[in-house]
Image (cartoon, rainbow, N blue to C red):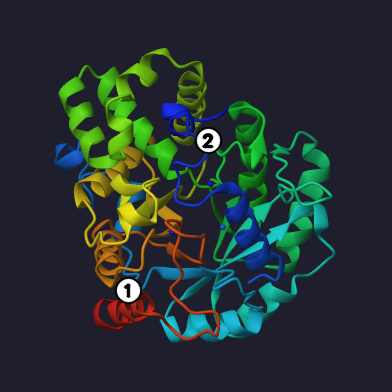
Amino acid sequence: MKLQAFLFSILALPLYYHCNNISQRNENEEQAQSEQPADPSIAQSQVPVGDTTQSAKNKKHDDKSSKNPFGVLIAKTDNQTIPPEKQVEIARSLGVNYVRARITVADWKGSSDAYDQYAAAGFKIILNINYDIPRDAIGDKKPIPFVTDMQAYGKTLNAILDKYKPELAIIENEEDNPGYHSGTAQQYLAQLKTAIDICHAHGVKVTNAGLTDREIAVLVYDDFMRSGKKSEANEFAQRAFPERYKSKLNQFYQNNPMVARQLDFGRQVMEAYKTLDLDYVNFHWYEPTALRGAGPDGIADAQNIDPTVFDAVVNYIKRVTGKPVITNEFGQLNASPAIVKQLMQKVLDARMDYAIWYSADGGEGKAVALQNGNGSLRENGIAFRDFIKEHCK
């Protein structure tokens, strides 16, 4: 199953090309984490997924025999809050190694009950360290500026990591998402650099916030276009973008100032990720990708993903940044067990160290959870569990 963006703006549609609308995603992620645990065959990349000729750092990660890279973020399901103790039960039933949690810097009081419960249950923690929650006092969306007071930020981040040592720290959530953050790419990069230094000083691996699926897809398209490969760009677009966007794609790509701002942000951070001491580059992804924004009637019967799109995205990130790739948020837009298995197989094919499933209900045609509100597994959740049993022994 996150600058106004290119795919936010196409066809004058509001912010929701992405699988979850921002308000629902914020609600789900706040609930999950305040309780704590929301192309083509034409892959242009010079480095195929799993290729052994990549950099030494990539090879080190690709050679790592992590048999089960899967984790879960569990949030509101069937309009019911899922408390941490129930999340633990669900995570165990799914067979995951990792649970995604969140600690908010602005609200840090010395400990996190949800983190403690996850750790006590034996899970390794993939920890989002977010500065604040993107809501105002009455609960409306209010994007959070990137941190500029590095001294105060660093003091609290040090305190958090003195208390806890997560498996991996994620710095903010979706750096390119204007519903979550305000500010420039350079402001985010300055905050990220401070966090990297502190995390590594504590022996904690660290990655970026997670480029949204809309951002990373348009960056791949842009990469083809800037390389003079228009036919490859168009083929990727046919595979990766919803039908109603395709006829307007070139028009908006070339003429829309919001597209220019989106691309500028993405290009800047991707360029910086080459040289920053990140352990991974993180992106978010939902399938079936070509049906995002199609609504429940257009997506309910979809049973397959286009694997070449996922390959193209992973290859692009590896080639451009030279870093291994993970996802701390991926999921599905319908309840198809087939899509669960196909998408999990692509994670294994890409030899990712971590892949965290977003298991929450985002509303019709948006993210679909693996569990019911009472904690029992849905058919897609059973497929998720059985895939781990079969392939991740």
Look at the image and tell me whether residue 46 can be seen.
no
Q: Residues within 10 Å of mark 1 (few under 14, many from 20)?
A: some
Is residue 240 found left or right of 136 in the rendered image? left
Give the mark toward the camera: 2 or 1.
2
Q: Picture quarter containing residue 78?
A: bottom right
Amino acid identity at mark 2: Pro
Q: Amino acid at mark 1?
A: Lys
Mark 2, other Cα within 10 Å: few <14 / some 14–19 / many ≥20? few
Between residues 45 and 358, which one lies in front from this camera angle?
A: 358
Q: Which residue is outermost to the top?
A: 255
Question: At numbered mark 2, what does the secondary structure look like: helix, strand or loop?
Answer: loop
- On the image, numbered disc 2 is attached to which residue? 14
How far across and down, in percent of the image, does residue 349 sit? 23, 60
Residue 222 higher or lower than 165, as above or below = above
Could you tell me how many numbered marks the image carries? Answer: 2
Locate the C terminus by quadrant.
bottom left
Q: Which residue is mark 1?
A: 67
Q: Residue at x 44, y 51 (%)?
A: 19
Residue 278 located left or right of residue 193:
left
